[in-house]
Amino acid sequence: MLLTAVPAWAGVVWRGDFETGDRSQYSAAHMVSADRLQVVTSPVAEGRYALKATVRQGDDPIDSSGNRAELVYLTYEPEGSEYYYRWKVMFPADYPSARAWQLFTQWHHDGNDGSPPVEFYVYGEELRLRVNDSVDVWSAPLVRGVWHEFVFRVKWSPDPNVGFVELWHNRERAVARRNVPTMYAGMRNYLKLGLYRSDTIAPVGVVYHDGFTQATRLEDVLPPPPSPAPDAGTPDAGTPDAGTPDAGAPDAGTSPPADAGSAGTGGEPVLVPGDDAGAEEVTPFGCSVAGSPLLAISLLSLVGGLLLRRRR
């Protein structure tokens, strides 16, 4: 199923799209210095701004088990709530490949220990979605240098019969609705966006994020359709119609006057322009065209016959 944009915004709960030009839409920032989480004007997926998250080996601003540069939004979605989330992510051409975890979006529980109940991450050359710290419900090739769009639907619940996830990747359904626990019992979830990875990875990692939106309806997280471009095939008022010949000009659908030295010399067949179906072949030189030598010979014979009759 392809997602299509619908211009409706009534169900938007929150935006973290950086269109404020700074990080003020978020609750906190986990970074060792301000250059690790920068709001930039290029590259962007939409609007004017995006987030550039940079991680170097040893970046550990909260004394945890890995290196990170992440923004935090304390959503604390209540159990039983259901939302759609949409955002875009780009991995540049030099993004490191490592057979180790590299989270770029997660919904973390408010406990201190353990992996988050929902995590989007890179492993080797794959993008993956893991739920409930045990089940990878989706994977796809890691394509660098392009924007990946995610639309993620979640019912928040620790009950496997109630909680579920559904995912679209680049407007195509990637995960059909699947029941799975999406929370840990007695805990609440909140959003973390940026890059969080194993401290065994040495190369610098950069990830770009843009357009994050949370809403209660699918149509509310999708951007409005672009404004239609002017119809290049419809001339403006007062502009001559390029398809209508001017008065006295040759009709483009009929054969133009013969051009001296043009195709046809040498006895090659010529197709009459403007009539591809059943076009007539015209031989410029031959014995079947009016004005040819055959006609002249016939006239001379006729005149000669008349003169002979008179002599008789």
Image (spheres, helix red, strand yellow):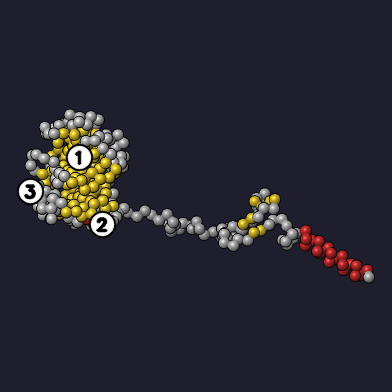
Mark in the foreground, 2 or 3 = 3
Tell me the amino acid under the disc marked 3: Ala
Mark in the foreground, 3 or 1 = 3
Q: Nearer the viewer, residue 99 or 52?
A: 99
- Dividing the picture into quarters, in which one does residue 208 lie? top left
- Dividing the picture into quarters, in which one does residue 88 lie? top left
Q: Nearer the viewer, residue 161 or 237?
A: 161
- Which residue corresponds to mark 3? 185
- The residue most toward the front is 134
- Which numbered circle lies on residue 103? 1
- Circles 2, 3 touching at the beta carbon (< 8 Å): no
Position of residue 116 relative to residue 54, above or below, is below
SS label for mark 1: strand
Instruction: Give how far apart the Cα atoms at labels 3 and 1 are.
Output: 23 Å
**Is residue 312 at least partly visible in the picture?**
yes
Q: Earlier in the sequence, mark 1 or mark 2?
A: 2
- Dividing the picture into quarters, in which one does residue 253 lie? bottom right
